[in-house]
Structures are given as C-alpha cells and as structure tokens.
Amino acid sequence: MAAAVLDAIKAKFGPGILATSSHHGDDVAIVKREALREIASFLRDDPAMAFKLPCYCTCIDYLGLEGLAPSAGTVPTGYASRTRGEGSGAPGARFAMVYELRSLTHGHRIRLKVPLMEEDLVVPSLADLWPAFNWLERETYDMYGVSFQGHPDLRRIFMYEEFVGYPLRKDYPKEKRQPLVRREWSDE
C-alpha cells in the first residue's frame, strides 16, 4: 500500500530513517527523534503524500519485551527479516512513541515509531502540525511520562497533578496507593 511512501521518505531523509517494514498491510517507519518533525511536515505538506488525517499517537512500553523494541541504531530480532533497513538484532529502547497517519487523498496509511530510552523520554510535539494530537500527547504524558517539547499546554489530563508515577507503564505497582488530596470545593 504505502510502500512507495516508505521508499520516498527513506530516499529523502536517509539517515533519519532507521528502518522500514511493510508486513500484512502495516507500513512502518522507525525514525530518529531528531528527524521526526521534518518527516511529519513532509508527510503532511507534500501533495504526493497528503497525510492530513492524524489517527492516533501513543506510547508503547516494551518492558520484558525489549528484544521486540525498536532501537536507536538497530532493528529488533525477528523484525529484520521483513524490513528494508539495516539491523543487528540487538535489544532496543524500552519505549517507543507511535504515530499513525492516513492520507484520504491517496488511500495511504503509515505508522511512525520513535525509539526512546527510559532515561530520555523527550520527543518533539506534533500538536502544531495536527491539532488533534494536542490531547493525545497530553494523555501520553500523563500515562507514560513522555515529555513533548514545544507542546502548548503539557499537563496531566486524566490524573490529578499530585498523582505520583505513570499508571500505564508496565512497572507501575498495581497496589500502589496515592495521596489523598483535598480540594477547596470539596465538602469533605
């Protein structure tokens, strides 16, 4: 489907694309964090691409599955056999930011993945390119702790500000108790 799109971004952005794959209709480009905004702008603005519909953005926590995670310089084991990128099969980053985009004009769909190390969970915001990503980036910040540089209003959206931790991370203890916070408007 969007194999031509994968070829186009790989040709245009070269080292910014770590790997690509097209498997069972899922076209995926693993991209460097530093190249994400430039690639996203190209996909949105180029008439041959026309990715005007942002479907979702979220984070994946690969804790316990590090061998399946995309890496900043390698392709995970079992992934290299179906990619067009280079890969050594070394374990990857713990987290990956994932963006799904669609082009209604051309009928394409593409998924961008940005590998993130646990100690460096920062990625550029795409909320100014696609306003629909504003709240989805806030949700990802709230649930996983990923910080979005340049986001217009990065604050918690589901949990209260005093909440400690990030509840969708795989290492978040399910028995953890949170502090009771009294609000001025509360009768109790």
Image: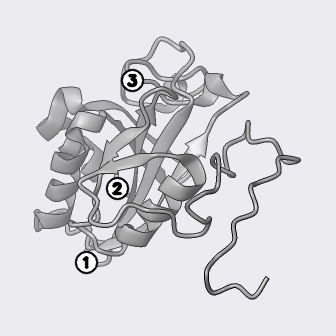
The residue located at (47%, 11%) in the rendering is 88
Q: Amino acid at mark 1?
A: Thr
Q: Picture coordinates of residue 145 (x, y %)?
A: 52, 46
Closer to the chain start, of discs 3 and 1, is 3
Mark 1–mark 2 distance (CA, rounded to whole Å) = 13 Å
Q: Amino acid at mark 2?
A: Ala
Instruction: Tell me the residue that label 1 is attached to.
Output: 105
Furthest-right residue in view? 175
Closer to the chain start, of discs 2 and 3, is 2
Instruction: Tell me the residue that label 2 is attached to.
Output: 2
Label 3 packing within 10 angstroms: few (<14), some (14-19), many (20+): some
Q: Picture coordinates of residue 47 (x, y %)?
A: 11, 68
Q: Amino acid at mark 3?
A: Ala
Q: Look at the numbered disc 2 and give the secondary structure of its residue.
A: loop
Q: Picture coordinates of residue 58 (x, y %)?
A: 51, 56
Instruction: Tell me the residue that label 3 is attached to.
Output: 72
The residue located at (63%, 48%) in the rendering is 166
Please tell me whether residue 139 is drawn above or below residue 174 in the rendered image: below
Asked if the residue under mark 1 is in contact with the one under mark 3, i.e. CB atoms within 8 Å, the reply is no
Mark 3–mark 1 distance (CA, rounded to whole Å) = 32 Å
* Total count of labels: 3
